[in-house]
Amino acid sequence: MLAGFSMRNFGPFRDDASVSFSADSPDEHCGNILETKLPGQGLLGFILIYGPNCSGKSFFLEGFSVLKKIVSGEDVRRLANPFCSSGERGCCEFSVSASIGFVQIAYSVSFSSSGIASESLYQIVSGHRSMVFSRSGGSFRFGKNSGRDFRSAEPDPFRSFLHSASSGSDMCRAVSDEILSIRIAEPGISGAAGMIKENEELRSVVLRALRLTGFDVTGFDFSGGSPVIVKRCGDNE
């Protein structure tokens, strides 16, 4: 389960832009809290990002999409989009934390149009942080007793090592699957409406989010050209 995401030097974001999925209170929006196997930690099942036009919402969602493309093995040179005033434009940086079973993980990657500059994966068990792998340019380090998991991995200066290592490492495969399972609603009415119409699970999530706002929404009507939100008013819809 996703616990947090941050990015730096990407699109309009020069400094850190981040979001946390940790629940502040188990009593607030309890229908949206997922229980983890870690003691005392609840995570939000979904979040809504809102704000004025041109405030960076679409680029923030694009950051999630780019992270998924990196983890799936795409060439990072086509994905780099650094902040326009960052000196020599520098590296885009993405970091993600997640809860996988009884283990917390922290994955980060830094890249530019020249390739991957750095990448690392750490796991946190009982408060102890241990390295799974770390790369800086073409140099690699592996955690204790984990080197054998990476014998079949083929390092590529332009693609994530996490993707390559997923074939031999159960931990890397679990982290990769977790990141690739992130679901993002497309910005824009037509794209979002299409996703909601075709995906029953996503439609249920959106309805739950709308109901948390206090509106008595009962469903969607797709019979016309545009989706219509059906809301209960007294005894009528």
Image (spheres, rainbow, N blue to C red):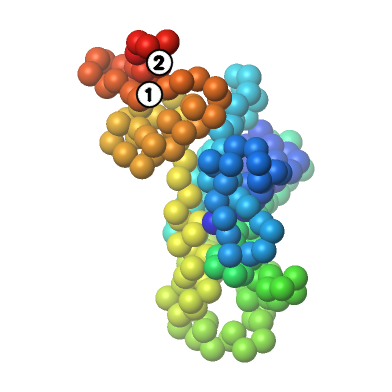
Left or right: 56 as drawn, with respect to 148: right
- Whether the residues at callouts 2 and 1 have beta carbons within 8 Å, the answer is yes
Q: What is the CA distance from the residue labelled 2 to the residue labelled 1? A: 7 Å
Question: Identity of the amino acid at label 2?
Answer: Arg
Above or below, comparing residue 193 to residue 151 in the picture: above
SS label for mark 2: loop
Toward the left, the furthest residue is 223
Q: How busy is the neighbourhood of tag 2: few (under 14 within 10 Å), some, or many (20 plus)?
A: few
Residue 214 seen from this side: yes
Q: How busy is the neighbourhood of tag 1: few (under 14 within 10 Å), some, or many (20 plus)?
A: some
Q: Which of 7 and 24 lies nearest the eye of the viewer?
A: 24
Snapshot quadrant of residue 10: top right
Image quarter where the C terminus lies is top left
Q: Position of residue 76 (x, y in %)?
A: 52, 55
Image quarter where the N terminus lies is bottom right
- Residue at coordinates 56% horizontally, 38% vertically from top-left? 47
Q: Which mark is residue 218?
A: 1
Q: Position of residue 124 (x, y in %)?
A: 69, 70
- Residue at coordinates 45% horizontally, 62% vertically from top-left? 177
Above or below, comparing residue 51 to residue 108 in the picture: above
Q: Earlier in the sequence, mark 2 or mark 1?
A: 1
Q: Which mark is residue 105?
A: none
Q: Which of 100 and 234 lies nearest the eye of the viewer?
A: 234
Q: Position of residue 195 (x, y in %)?
A: 35, 34
Kindly identify which residue carries mark 2: 232
